[in-house]
Amino acid sequence: MINLRDHHEKEIKWKNSTLRNVKNQGAKIAGFFALLFMLAVLVSIFGYILHGGASHITLRMFTTYGNTTTGGLLNAIIGTWLLVGMGLLFSVPSGVLGALYNVQSTSSTRIRSVTRLFTDILTSVPSIVIGLFGYLVLVIRFDMGFSLLAGGIALGIMMLPYVMRISEISMKNVPQEQVNNAYALGADRIQVASRIYLPQARAGIISGILLAIGIAAGETAQLLYTAGWNNALPSGFMKSQVAYLTYVVWYGINQPSSYAHELAFASALILIIMVTVLISISKFVGRKRV
Amino acid sequence: MEISKLSVRAGQKTILDNVDINIYRNRVNTIVGPSGGGKSTFLKCLNRLAELDRNYRVTGEIFLEGKNVREYGEIELRRRVGMVFQRPNPFPMSVYDNVAFGLRLQGNVKKDEMDMMVSSSLQEAGLFDEVSDNLKRPASTLSGGQQQRLCIARALILRPAVLMLDEPTSSLDPVAKGKIEELMLELKERYTVVLVTHDIGQARKVSDYTSLLFNGKIVASGEGKDFLERTSDDTMKAFLGDLTA
């Protein structure tokens, strides 16, 4: 005799497992195609820029100044690094100190959650809005003009949340026991910061900084309103405009000149390589445990 | 040290409740009791580490050599009252730098003076012979037991009056544990030792004065190694029974 109930249960099990298998397989296939699609997009961007840029890039572009339609890119390359460097000057001290404050403060968690909310919002503020702020407040109100200082601060505002959050996360990974132990050995707050948190979170902080550089180097919108353009290098921190690579891409592509297009492609290629290298280094540094 | 009416509250919870206890000089003073009974918090009150956590409300008086611990600066107090934690947690530095850490915090110490202090602390912690061939090796290459003795050396370099050990052997194997127990008996010649443990066997081996801390209260205390056996206290007996069952 067949035990009906057993038989019935087996059937349900079989049905469930087939359904699950079909779902599993479906999800796998969908995931695979999504991945394929993403890779295709990535490869086509890289391929397009590489194809367009590599064939036009010349050594002269690295050695001469230019005005986006003629000449080279040296002023834009140096200008990009000057702006990023200025951004670092503003974002690294405040970001790292802010992270230290957040991990060390014994005060209410409310302050911490407010700063966290603030940094989260800051990461998602559109760069054009930061540009507008930079223009109205820095360029006009503080009378900096389109300049290294105004552009650097505008970039710094954008870099700050990355530096701060990644620093904070890596400081949180420092074992609390070691922190307590340092206090138990008579360390004060500053010594715990400088001898325990900073050395042990160093790799994480550096990877945060590199990521922020990578992101900042590719920004355009806030610089349009704060840095301007310069056919040479800026003569000072204020009231002297600065050239940068993304401007060449943004401006050159609209010009009725094939050399302007070549410059734009070359700039895009340089940017992509810079960002790729920086982000790869940041991943590598972040993974390395000291 | 004299501790009177020490209470610690965290929110609504009472962690320590009116603890009165004396810590005797050059003795091993042991606090035994089940986990979660407030033993670690008790130690953290003696060096005011508990105050780092704002949730804790500490009341009562603690005197070190006749002076209220609140009259010492926190940092000065922590140099006088050393602490070794439950799990060995050397800093990610060399053996030498680990031991030198506490002294370096105080400012510049001459190299030869530092060398001398580091080796004498390692000797006192019974680790010197095992590591003297290379003090620059990373502390993480030592075994668990060696790491814990390194932590003891790190605390001893400050020449504290009191050395507190918070379940120092709970993560160690029996051999390493035995070494640290022997070490405690040597250390009490020069230091006042406060040992927190839930290991009754360890208390029997090393303790001169034993107190039982149960749910934040001292329910029994007495002198001598056999105090644990001759106690008539019911809570103590129940606790001992729990552990031997």
Image (cartoon, coloured by chain):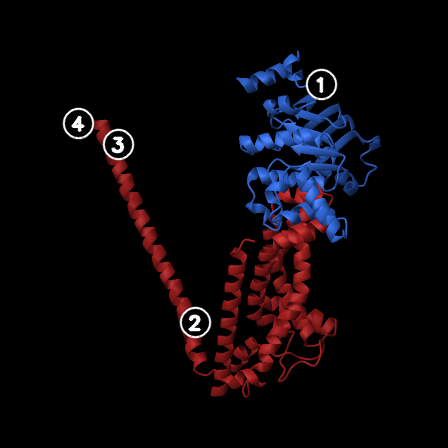
| Residue bearing the label numbered 1 | B223
Tell me where residue A74 appears, x and y as whole percent: 58, 82
Q: Are marks 4 and 2 on the same chain?
A: yes
Question: Which amino acid type is marked by label 3?
Answer: Glu
Picture layout, residue A188 above or below residue A81: above
Disc 1: host chain: B
Q: Secondary structure at mark 2?
A: helix
Whether residue A237 is visible to the viewer of this picture, yes or no, is yes
Distance CA(mark 1)–CA(mark 3)? 69 Å
| Residue bearing the label numbered 4 | A2
Q: Are marks 1 and 3 on the same chain?
A: no
Q: Residue at x 68, y 55 (%)?
A: A98
Front of the two marks 2 and 1: 1
Q: Residue furthest top?
A: B232
Q: Secondary structure at mark 4?
A: loop
Q: Nearer the viewer, residue B46 or B180?
A: B180
Q: Residue furthest left?
A: A1
Q: Quick check: B139 left or right of B162?
A: left
Distance CA(mark 4)–CA(mark 1)? 76 Å
Q: Residue at x 74, y 42 (%)?
A: B158
Distance CA(mark 2)–CA(mark 1)? 78 Å
| Residue bearing the label numbered 2 | A46
